[in-house]
Amino acid sequence: MEKLTVLPYKGLGSVISAETISFHHGKHLNAYVTNLNKAVEGTPMADMTVEQLIVKSAAEGLTPVFNNAGQVLNHNCYFEQFKEDAAADAAPGGKLADAIEAEWGSFEAFKAAFNAAGTAIFGSGWVWLQADAEGKLSIGKYSGADNPVAHGLRPILTFDVWEHAYYLDYQNRRPDYLAALWQIIDWKVVEARY
Ligand SMILES: [Fe+2]
């Protein structure tokens, strides 16, 4: 049984307003958690982890389970990686920083590629930094609830590009929203995923 993580409904600096968080976490994520629990209740799936539910539902075409489990994992990764007082110029360190540099040449070049990928997603979806079994990084563009876990990859960092994530604060300006999110990334959380 999934539980909604507790999140104080205050804003994240000037980047995401308290109003957006109250709708995005309190209404949208809450609905995904509730609907996932309803979909698996009374079945052997009730004891599975969200990751296991994503893999099983992807393989077996269980669309309602896939959509809700995917959205639970996606949003948990999204909300857990933010920190109100993260340094605006913060950058990753350690082996994640090395792997980013190896793949894109610099953190700045990676950010530009990530923002461009997020901007290019048509309609609702997610842009991810993901790693394969060898630790090789790539940027993934996913529609709807799809995510790296469904494709055998490890989720590292994600920006939600569903309109519910940014419309109240940025209206249709998705590129501005994507550019601003870097100011609130808690890199310690993201590095631990790698
Ligand atoms: Fe969302």
Image (tube, rainbow, N blue to C red):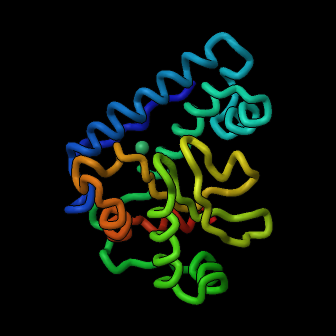
Residue in the foreground of this view, choosing between 1 and 29: 29
Q: Position of residue 99 (x, y in %)?
A: 65, 79
Please report the residue visible at 74 percent of the width from the left and 18 percent of the height from the top: 44
Report whether 103 appears left or right of 124.
right
Q: Is residue 161 above or below residue 71?
A: below
Q: Where ligand 1 lies, by image quadrant? A: top left
Please report the residue visible at 51 percent of the width from the left and 57 percent of the height from the top: 121
Q: Position of residue 194 (x, y in %)?
A: 63, 65
Q: Is residue 107 above or below residue 169?
A: below
Please report the residue visible at 56 percent of the width from the left and 41 percent of the height from the top: 145
Please report the residue visible at 30 percent of the width from the left and 75 percent of the height from the top: 88
Outermost residue, top side: 42
Q: Position of residue 177 (x, y in %)?
A: 32, 62
Q: Quadrant of residue 62?
A: top right
Outermost residue, front side: 122
Outermost residue, bottom side: 105
Q: Position of residue 4 (x, y in %)?
A: 43, 32
Total marks placed? 0
Q: Quadrant of residue 56?
A: top right
Quarter of the image for the N terminus: give it.
top right
Q: Is residue 7 above or below residue 181?
A: above
Residue in the foreground of this view, choosing between 59 and 102: 59
